[in-house]
Image (cartoon, helix red, strand yellow):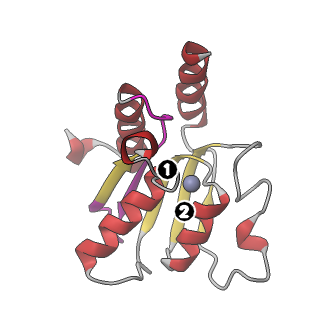
Amino acid sequence: MSWSMTPIEIALQEARDAAARGEVPVGAVVTDASGTVLARAGNRVEEMHDPTAHAEILALRAAAALRGSPRLPDCTLTVTLEPCPMCAQAASFFRLRRVVFGAYDPKGGGVEHGARIFQASSCHHTPELIGGVREGECTSLLRDFFVVRR
Ligand SMILES: [Zn+2]
């Protein structure tokens, strides 16, 4: 039941659903200040033929559409994997209050690794960051997916 699930649990469910569709298992959820879920999504890169259809982008766009605003300053993005540079930049553009993620991504991440978007001088809004939430579960979901496909 979604009312009893924490945001990271919802994101994990979205990630599992994405895996079942043949997508890289990443899930994301946007919650408001009271913890109400505004939007949730999993990767749909293959389905939409769109390399930018990452879970975070889809969830943020849906939340902004629901709000009727391009800014979500009271909102938290919770995602199973460290956001890539594109999604980290989007989190800044949407003026998010907080970004919570599960697994760290040394190869593709853009928050704690690589471009480190929020530390760049071109980044004008930095959300509060919390990494490593339910890290083991989030990491093994990805690892299992790539082991099966390899
Ligand atoms: Zn991304």
Q: Secondary structure at mark 2?
A: strand
The residue under the point 40% across, 65% down is 60
In the depicted structure, whether residue 89 falls above or below residue 51: below
Q: Percent x, y for residue 14?
A: 36, 40
Q: Percent x, y for residue 121?
A: 79, 82
What residue would you read off at disc 2?
99
Measure the alpha-carbon separation of dots 1 and 2.
Answer: 8 Å
* Residue 98 in view in this figure: yes
Q: Ligand 1 lies in which image quarter?
A: bottom right
Q: In which quadrant is the C terminus drawn?
A: top right
Between 52 and 76, the one nearer to me in the picture: 52
Q: Residue furthest front?
A: 49
Q: Percent x, y for residue 101?
A: 56, 50
Between 134 and 90, the one nearer to me in the picture: 90
Q: CB atoms at circles 1 and 2 under 8 Å apart? A: yes
Residue type indicated by callout 2: Val
* Residue 34 in view in this figure: no
The residue under the point 43% across, 47% down is 49
The residue under the point 49% across, 50% down is 79
Q: Percent x, y for residue 77?
A: 46, 61
Between 102 and 70, the one nearer to me in the picture: 70
As for residue 12 lying within the magenta part, the answer is no
Packing grade of label 1 (10 A; few <14, some 14-19, many >=20) is many
Q: In which quadrant is the N terminus drawn?
A: top left
Q: Secondary structure at mark 1?
A: strand
Which residues, given as a range, are shown in magenta? 22-38
| Quadrant assignment, res 73 | bottom left
What residue would you read off at disc 1?
79
In the depicted structure, whether residue 130 falls above or below residue 62: above
Packing grade of label 2 (10 A; few <14, some 14-19, many >=20) is many
The residue under the point 40% across, 45% down is 44
